[in-house]
Amino acid sequence: MKLIINTLITLAVGFTMTGCATTLGKHGDKYSNVSVSKLLQQKEMPEENKAIMVPALKQRAENDLQSGDFKSAIEHANLAAKWSPEDTNIKYLLAEALFKSGNTRKSQILFSELVETDPKAENFQGYGLSLLSNNKYPESHNWLNKAVIENGELWRSWNGLGMIYDKSKDWKNAEQAYKVAIAQEKNTSSYHNLAMSYMNQDRLEEALISFENAKALSDGNSYPDLQYRTALALSGEIDNALNGTTDAQASDLYNQLGVRAMRNGERGNAIKFLKLAIAKSPTFHANAEKNLALVATQSP
């Protein structure tokens, strides 16, 4: 398996992502802004009208999926699938929207059907990622491998493979998989996962670089930087790590440092950081209290 992946990694570097879009005719444009609720009210709609509206619903679902409006994407794809149940592309849009909205179990069911009826790389990827999100690692590994064998450009598949390798502490293959994902498309997820992989290996300098790449892509907005600040603190930059934090964020950072110290058998540092977490927290910090009680039971 490792040999296959290493070979694929070599072959995949340098590819670019491609996409497709559904082209609407004038009839589709006519119905492109009609609300789903209004369509559903028409119980006796003629079949020819449904056929005209399906492309518009399909396009709306695709647009909503790309813009991140997953609820709307699900509504429009559901109705399109009801009127055109044999259209596997509509089912794919619905499965993707469900996955990205967090309903991974239902998306797993749809993708399991798609890999049988429409066996192609994007459906292998969707099924593999749905399985991964439900902690079915061996099955996920199999389908994500199928996806990259079929299409080495799918960065999400490489990212998923990296997560699986990380789970088994296969650091070398995890690093390679994340780097292929980034080569296909620079994305926050793979940079962040690569940084976390480096942190788990105590490769802090490399972790910081990867965290900074992730932050740059997200423009610093809504980036979950607790782990980044933890890497800074572990690198000896505690003041920099605390710079700009609220009391709650500083408390979470101290708790994170305490947990790492516990795992490394550094009882004294664990107690110090966990007490700082409790003292700094503006409210009761249940995790820090629990961790402090746990470390207190450890031998000095």
Image (cartoon, grey):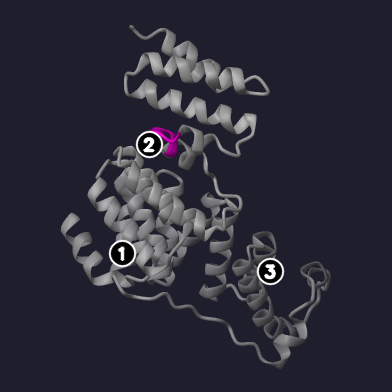
Q: Residue at x 48, y 57 (%)?
A: 188
Magenta run includes residue 107: no
The amino acid type, in three-letter code, at marker 2 is Ser
Crowding at mark 1 (Cα within 10 Å: few <14, some 14-19, many 20+): some
Report the disc number at residue 225: none
Q: Is residue 193 left or right of residue 97?
A: left
Of residues 300 and 107, the one nearer the viewer is 300
The CA distance from mark 3 to mark 1 is: 30 Å
Mark 3, residue position: 76
The amino acid type, in three-letter code, at marker 3 is His
Magenta run includes residue 234: yes
Mark 2, residue position: 235
The amino acid type, in three-letter code, at marker 1 is Lys
Classify residue 54 by image quadrant: bottom right
Residue 31 x/y as whole percent:
76, 82
Which of the two labelled residues, at mark 2 and mark 1, occupies the earlier sequence position? 1
Q: Secondary structure at mark 1?
A: helix
Of residues 77 and 264, the one nearer the viewer is 264
Q: Secondary structure at mark 2?
A: loop
Which of the two labelled residues, at mark 3 and mark 1, occupies the earlier sequence position? 3
Mark 1, residue position: 146
